[in-house]
Amino acid sequence: MTNDLIKETYTLSNGMTVPKIGFGCYNPKGGDTYGMIRRAIDAGYTYFDTASLYETERALGQAVKDSGKRREDFIIASKAWHDEMGAGNVREAFFRSLKRLQLDYIDLFLIHWPRPNTQCDWKKLDLETWSELEKLKEQGFIRALGVSNFLPHHLENLLDHSDTKPVVDQMELHPGYLQEAAVRFCQEHEILPQAWGPIGRGWIFQNSVVNDLSSKYGKSFAQICLRFLLQRGIQPMPKAMSEEHMWENADVFDFEISREDMWLMSCMPQTDWLGEHPDLAIPQKASNPDQ
Ligand code: NAD
């Protein structure tokens, strides 16, 4: 059975429409990624977020192929990891992703992190990478370009020196970690903020503010988090293994968090975060070209 709960869409600055909720394909604990994605397709998700680092591109490509749906019914997004940046590197990395996904084109391709390490000339590297991605887009291999974990100063570098504006910026965003300045900057520049870790990888579940609102609205913690992000104009990318959680996370379009409660959640004490700041600490894991 397929649900059609995620009917609402955002329109990106290049005119593309995307469902308001995507599905995250990061599955670090392993397990049956292919089965997870097939269940998510059956549950009605059509936007899938992966990355070369996640090593889930093959499973995603196969699941899309086996679904019996049309390619154009899906929005597939992937990302280049920090050791895949630079003109030649990113072109090769892109075609490795395309091959693993068994696709002719990718809908959205993102730079995963703005700076590989704190010492390098990241502005030059980002621009060189971006310019190569622009060529791939012109050649019809990519429909839209985006970024991930970019803060306003990283975005300004692209906006000031290139003709292509990123259509999305994927950041860690959830109640208690809102990155207000970055979200505001994105929205002022028609860049759709996407939320990774939108239900806070479980930390939120102990939070008393979210807990109380969950009881008040008769919705789960996850649904309160996702609804909150949607009402802030953000596109969440929840990941879930179980069918029950997949359905629950899509079922957030039939209620409204009140203005007062939105302010309460917006001003609640900070919760935890993953601890990776794009300018301070970056994940050092290398990509695996042979995956
Ligand atoms: P998440 O907030 O989506 O949390 C996932 C965890 O919550 C899983 O353990 C899942 O089983 C559980 N869960 C899901 N639905 C639930 C529900 N309704 N009730 C209770 N528990 C539930 O965090 P995430 O997986 O870190 O992030 C989501 C996606 O964002 C990833 O899969 C990936 O696509 C993307 N991501 C991007 C970056 C980046 O740097 N761009 C980094 C991390 C993740």
Image: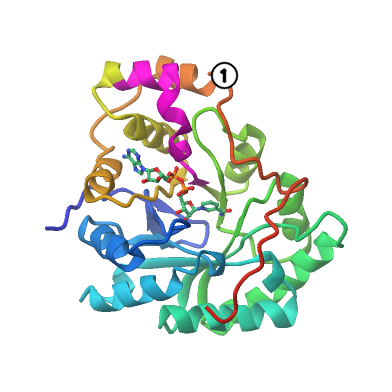
Residue 281 percent across, percent down from the top left: 74, 47
In this rendering, would 201 be left or right of 34? right
For the magenta stretch, what is the residue range?
195-214
- 55 shown above or below 207: below
Residue at position x 67%, y 51% from top? 150
Of 6 and 16, nearer the camera is: 6
- Identify the coloring: rainbow
Q: Which residue lies furthest to the left in this view?
A: 1
Q: Mark 1 points at which residue?
A: 269
Residue 158 percent across, percent down from the top left: 73, 59
In this rendering, would 120 be left or right of 4? right
Of 109 and 52, nearer the camera is: 52
Residue at position x 66%, y 62% from top? 285
Kind of residue indicated by mark 1: Pro
Of 227 and 163, nearer the camera is: 227
Quadrant of the image occupied by residue 27: bottom left
Residue at position x 54%, y 27% from top? 176
Residue 75 percent across, percent down from the top left: 39, 66
User: Is residue 211 located in the magenta-colored stretch of the structure?
Assistant: yes
- 113 shown above or below 193: below
Residue at position x 28%, y 18% from top? 215
Kindly report the secondary structure that dominates the magenta region of the rendered protein: helix
Quadrant of the image occupied by residue 59: bottom left
Q: Is mark 1 on a helix, strand or loop?
A: loop
